[in-house]
């Protein structure tokens, strides 16, 4: 088994202030308040709440003056929607990236970490990038909120990411890299609170869950490394990464989110995660509530992602 591991022992570069962390934390809390307390459970069994979440996401894009669209597909005699919004120049750019996050929750939980945290971070990255001038953003970023990921849709054609990735391959859509945000808000600081799947427990990964993880497959190894090095250079939060063989079938739990839909269609994709149930004991339970989340950690993830995309601006000297 081939595993490529990028160590986090490199010293952080000088931090560049781009994101107001206090304001970002407040915005993140507002998103979580709406998704988990006002709306609540967003499962396949409560599609009316899923629709409310879709409406909230749409209204947010309208608020920041970014056009969005619904991409409908059928589910159990009903209709659900992926919500798609683009930020950045639509001409003259060589690269198009996706930031995806599913906005449903598993039945019986309001889904704060899984996956409200990811939707909140997704929306705040969109806000930050939308405020940049086109000359400050050298690529196009497509934000996709996927309707369904949790059971009973999981591993079926009804996953929002499978619907989108299938269509993208059929239409030969340009996707230079897909970033799947999957549970990104929980931290733990007691030694031994962080665990790992086989065989990663045999590597020198941290015993505390105070970092963000980046998971790629072999096809995505360069993209994984690029993100990792950008996060390292930004120095906003600790980061660990791993590249797994093939499409991750040798470590099945690494496939448990929307990035795998893009792996299976041959696209470069990574999962950015707090490692889910390998750290968070509230996974898929009613205890997965917003009071358990680390909003400072989430705000620094927003900052790290913004840093990555700002780096995509071509150097003027290289264009001569």
Image: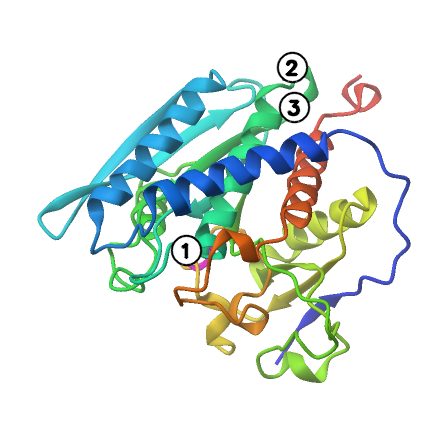
Q: Nearer the viewer, residue 267 or 32?
A: 32
* Residue, disc 2: 133
The answer to whether residue 24 is magenta is: no
Q: Residue at x 48, y 50 (%)?
A: 267
Q: Nearer the viewer, residue 291 or 53?
A: 291
Q: Nearer the viewer, residue 234 or 59?
A: 59
* Residue, disc 1: 111
- Could you give the CA–CA distance between mark 3 and mark 1, rounded to whole angstroms? 32 Å
Q: Which of disc 1 and disc 2 is earlier in sequence? A: 1
Q: Is residue 294 visible?
A: yes
Region in magenta: 258-263
Q: Which of disc 1 and disc 3 is earlier in sequence? A: 1
Left or right of 298 on screen, residue 191: right
Looking at the image, residue 146 lies above or below residue 286: above
Q: Are marks 2 and 3 in contact (CB under 8 Å)?
A: yes
Q: Residue at x 73, y 79 (%)?
A: 203
Residue 234 placed where, x, y %? Answer: 80, 42
**Magenta portion: prevailing SS class:** helix
Q: Residue furthest left?
A: 77
Q: Is residue 174 visible?
A: no
């Amino acid at each position: 088994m081939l595993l490529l591991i990028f160590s986090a022992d490199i010293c952080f570069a000088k931090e560049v202030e781009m994101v107001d962390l206090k304001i970002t934390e407040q915005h993140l809390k507002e998103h979580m308040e709406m998704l988990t307390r006002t709306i609540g459970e967003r499962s396949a069994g409560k599609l009316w709440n899923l629709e409310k979440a879709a409406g909230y996401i749409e209204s947010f894009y309208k608020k920041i003056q970014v056009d969005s669209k619904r991409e409908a597909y059928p589910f159990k005699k009903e209709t659900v929607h992926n919500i798609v919004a683009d930020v950045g120049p639509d001409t003259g750019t060589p690269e198009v990236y996706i930031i995806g996050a599913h906005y449903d929750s598993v039945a019986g939980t309001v889904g704060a970490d899984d996956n409200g945290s990811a939707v909140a971070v997704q929306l705040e990255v969109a806000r930050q990038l939308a405020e940049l001038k086109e000359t400050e953003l050298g690529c196009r970023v497509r934000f996709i909120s996927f309707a369904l990921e949790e059971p009973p849709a999981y591993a079926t054609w009804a996953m929002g990411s499978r619907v989108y990735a299938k269509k993208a391959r059929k239409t030969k859509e340009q996707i230079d890299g897909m970033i799947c945000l999957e549970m990104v808000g929980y931290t733990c600081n007691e030694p031994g609170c962080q665990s790992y799947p086989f065989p990663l427990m045999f590597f020198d990964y941290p015993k505390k869950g105070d970092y963000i993880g980046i998971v790629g497959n072999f096809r995505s190894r360069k993209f994984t490394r690029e993100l990792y090095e950008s996060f390292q250079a930004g120095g906003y939060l600790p980061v660990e990464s791993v590249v797994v063989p093939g499409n991750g079938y040798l470590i099945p739990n690494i496939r448990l989110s929307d990035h795998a839909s893009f792996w299976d269609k041959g696209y470069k994709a990574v999962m950015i995660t707090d490692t889910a149930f390998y750290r968070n004991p509230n996974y898929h339970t009613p205890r997965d509530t917003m009071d358990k989340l680390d909003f400072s950690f989430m705000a620094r993830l927003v900052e790290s992602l913004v840093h990555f995309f700002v780096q995509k601006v071509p150097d003027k000297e290289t264009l001569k």
